[in-house]
Amino acid sequence: MKSTLLKMKYLSCCIGAAALVSAYSVSAANLTTLNKKIENYKTVTHKRLVEAAPQDWLLPKGNYEGWMYSKLKEINSKNVSKLRPVWTYSTNLDSGHEAPAQINNGVMFVSTPYNNVLALNAKTGQLYWRYKHDNPYDLSVMHNTSRGVALWGDKVYVAGLDGTLNALDAATGERLCQSQIGDWSIGAYITSAPTPVKGKILVGPSGGEYGVRGFLEAMDAETCETAWKTYSVPGPGEPGHETWKYEGKRPDAWKYGGGSMWMPGNYDADEDILYWGVGNGSPWLGDQRPGDNLYVASSIAMDPDTGKIKGHYQYHYNDSWDWAAMNAPMLIDGLKDGRKKVKGLVSPQRNGYMYWLERDGKGKIDYLEGKPFVANNAFKSLDPKTGRPTYDYDHVPVTGKRVSYCPSLWGGKNWPYESYNPETGMMYVPANDNICNSFEGKFQDDVEPASGQFWAGIDIPDLDVYLADQSKGVGQMQAWDVNKREKVWQHDYGKTMNWGPVLSTAGNIVFSAGTNDRMLRAFDAKTGEVLWEFPLNSTAIAPPVAYEVDGKQYIAITAGYGVDPHWTNGVLAAKDESGEWISDVPEGGVIWVFALPDA
Amino acid sequence: MKEKLNDKHDGIEQTACCGCAQTNQNQPTDSKRRNLLKYLALAIPAVNCFTGNTALAAIKKKSPESKLPPQIGDRFTYFSKRLQGPLIKMSDLTELDKQVLVVPVDPKTGEVRDGSRYNQILIQKLSKDTLSTDTQQMSADGIVAYSAICTHAGCPVTGWVEDEGNYMCPCHQSVFDPKEGGGVVSGPAPRKLPALALTAENDELVVAAEFNSWIGFGKPPPR
């Protein structure tokens, strides 16, 4: 507690000085604009998070299992064509808006680029308060975004791009305490939504392109003190360290080997086990860090009380493609495996393969099956028992040689969440096929790892991104039967990537945006038919969510194009010769809320 | 870890104060520049007498001076901790090399001014024939210097587009032309990279004036 108070004391001293030099800085006493205090705020408890009542959207993915699913069905496949916007709210900010609206008993929280948090009346769109985080004036990060907040007790927790984790009073937005999780000056900035689990707030920084050794840290929700910290790359004496061979020019590669845990995880509340994703290796070239490199490109099971790693599954060894496994697998109980039913994990991975895994309730993760959902030319096959891939070394990036591979470094699917719908038994996957890239691996010895410099082992101007077949498009929505392990339907978006997280509902609808035509679409969940679409002000790359206030269902999504979707779209549009690729997508954050007309 | 962070916080406070000073300096005028050059003409020989050679024997401990923006008469050393130490000479640079990431050095004290990200600077030797007139005037025998901090989102602009002779930011691919005063060629950056006028003294690269624009992204700092 003492150190926390010291941090706050320090901040109150230094922030005023920072305000003199930057319009983005504000004084410590004025971080929050309070328009109206929230009265009778409903406390968020473990029970409520586990139950995930459909009128709320407390967690970034809706429930601890990571389903992106709503039980609400007032809006359904029969009436969705009548859906209309009922209110909007401008965030007054540019850049990529990637946070879902999170709703607690009629109060909506939205985090934004530049680390603002908005608290709004979810029914009317009226502002309660806005928190503006006091990022350092000379901050720089690769991805200026925020992917959501954590709701616990009577507080709202938001991570800062400056590597802080901040506790706000939910009623007023006042910052109560903070913890320094990552050092942004070395590249350990935070974009992830924090995850609340039993009185702790869990979050990990980015940094896989900067030579940062990844980790997940748990902060006490009341005191902002560190509860535990677990590195995704094991150190000497820890299990898995032997997969980092002391060979080559960098025998100490494990110290800066990446493996950022930069997305929120999932949680098995029955067994009390966390499931978290681990990102790419750093630098990208695997030959600069010999060995399998655990737990890079893995899902890991962890004890939420101690952070101990209880089990893992590595999707591909010695990652060389920037195919991060940052998204935690969805937890699906009763998953069919032949004649038996198992506690399953299902995950469409950035490497372009769909994985079916089994969890034993104690943290062990076993492979069941893997299937490609987009073209992957680097894997010849998967071992039928373990899922370990056999590589085609013509498509494994190495130092000193230009190598091409598919899917591109952004993967068959990037961070945008897939959705599992227990009503249809299907999983809905925002996919990108037909996109590849090439580059020559570089041994960067002009700067050190973890010095705040781009350190991915390539020179960015050397990166060539292209379509395998110019006549075909890229973005897709795929629907897979999770038990049959077969694709049921697919919608092709054409000449655009798909950066849209997916929501599915009990109303037999799949909602998603993420395409360069700015559309928010509603699909028939069973057939894939487009039932409704609406042009937003900008492309939405944030998760759509469903909630209910006073018995009425709403759909919310924040539009605001930026970061990787924006520049990949520009690169691909510039190469397009068909004239079909939309290059000019406007920026600007707007929260959109839709509902059916009153009867 | 906590002690380290406290150190960092101290740094933020100092940096903010330095930023205020920088704001005042970022209003270059011809008369001001003349005065600065006049100072430079007097100061550099004295500095050289003080330092005595082109290499620093050791980098001294950090002080508030390390957060100051580049000062008239400052030299340069490499940003890389591994390479840091020797002052950069004109003869260290050749036209075929990509831009080099450097930081200023106070020649009087040997203090490396790497206490602020805003002091990360790109230097590069280019063919004088390819430089615009204004860029030539800022350069020292074809060597140019720009702020490494991208005017879009603040990332260090370390990519080198060899075919075009341009810089590219690895974060969002803004491209800048060092031959044309650091102007924006493409990408989301809204304005050119701030340039730093150079001169030379005994083969050492020397800061001749302050940056010709404010550093960083977002709105300009208040005056």
Image (cartoon, coloured by chain):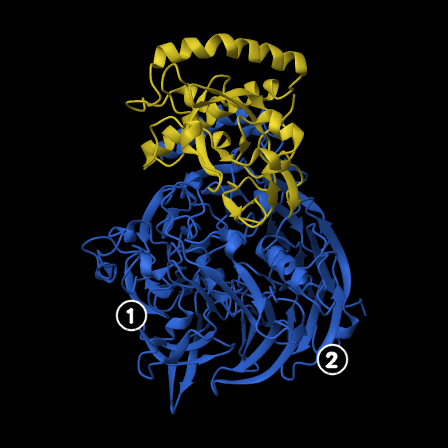
Chain colours: A blue, B yellow
Q: Amino acid at mark 2?
A: Lys
Q: Quadrant of residue A58?
A: bottom right
Residue name at image x 59 percent, y 52 percent: A563
Name the residue tied to disc 1.
Answer: A362
Crowd rating for badge 1 (residues with CA inside 10 Å; few <14, some 14–19, many 20+): some
Q: Is residue A15 left or right of residue A361?
A: right
Q: Quadrant of residue A433?
A: bottom right
Q: Is residue A406 left or right of residue A572?
A: left
Q: Is residue A35 above or below residue A273?
A: above
Q: Which secondary structure lies at badge 2?
A: loop
Q: Is residue A266 left or right of residue B129?
A: left
Percent position of residue A259, x then y: 37, 57
Percent position of residue A470, x then y: 64, 73
Q: Nearer the viewer, residue B15 or B135?
A: B135
* Residue A74 appears in the rendering: no
* Residue B107 appears in the rendering: yes
Residue name at image x 49 percent, y 61 percent: A48
Q: Which secondary structure lies at badge 1?
A: loop
Q: Is residue A177 above or below residue B188?
A: above
Chain assignment, label 1: A
Chain assignment, label 2: A
Name the residue tied to disc 2.
Answer: A78
Q: Residue furthest left?
A: A237
Q: Residue furthest front?
A: B129
Calculate the distance from the C-alpha at mark 2 to the C-alpha at mark 1.
43 Å
